[in-house]
Image (spheres, helix red, strand yellow):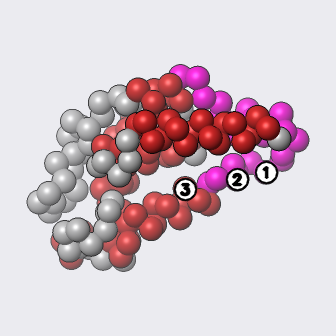
Amino acid sequence: MSGNNVEGSGGWQGTDITPIPVLEEVRIHGRAWEELAPQYGVTNPDPPWKIDLETTCDMLAADSCVKSYDEIEPGSCVLPALERRAEEDDLSETIYADVPFPERQLLALAHSMLKRGLFTEEELARQMEIVGQKLKSV
């Protein structure tokens, strides 16, 4: 676990930076948008999934985006904004340091969600396979 902690936190004890196999596979063999965009003739520097990533972070954070950390009711949100940002920082400085942004942010969010049990590695791998098949069929 990393030493990063949110000021005044009673529940969150830091980031579990233990690598997750399905995410390690993406980290090692995945391709960044910067590399993929020209292959498909896309000039937009932002990947099409970036807005979904940002929205997912906001939805998981619920009202923790507008409250101080000590005002957040336990269980009122899935992933408080300050915890997610602290975890993203910890993960970006360690196991995902070699991944470019925003892919690094995506892996950090998936890591945090997996560690909280919001879905399993198997479920994520299955969904990634479905998306991969759709992309290959186009």
- Tell me, yes or no, if residue 78 can be seen here: yes
- Which portion, as a residue range, is magenta? 28-50
Instruction: Give the SS element for disc 1.
Output: loop
Q: Residue at x 43, y 48 (%)?
A: 109
**Residue that lies at the very extreme toward the right in this rendered image:** 41
Query: What residue would you read off at disc 3?
Result: 53
Q: Are marks 1 and 2 in contact (CB under 8 Å)?
A: yes
x and y percentages locating residue 131 in the rendered image:
64, 42
- Tell me the tag on residue 44: 1
Mark nearer the viewer, 1 or 3: 3
Question: What is the quadrant of the N terminus in the image?
Answer: top left
Mark found first going from the N terminus, 2 or 3? 2
Q: Amino acid at mark 3?
A: Leu
Q: Is residue 136 above or below residue 105?
A: above
Q: CA distance from mark 1 to mark 3?
A: 16 Å
- Tell me the tag on residue 48: 2
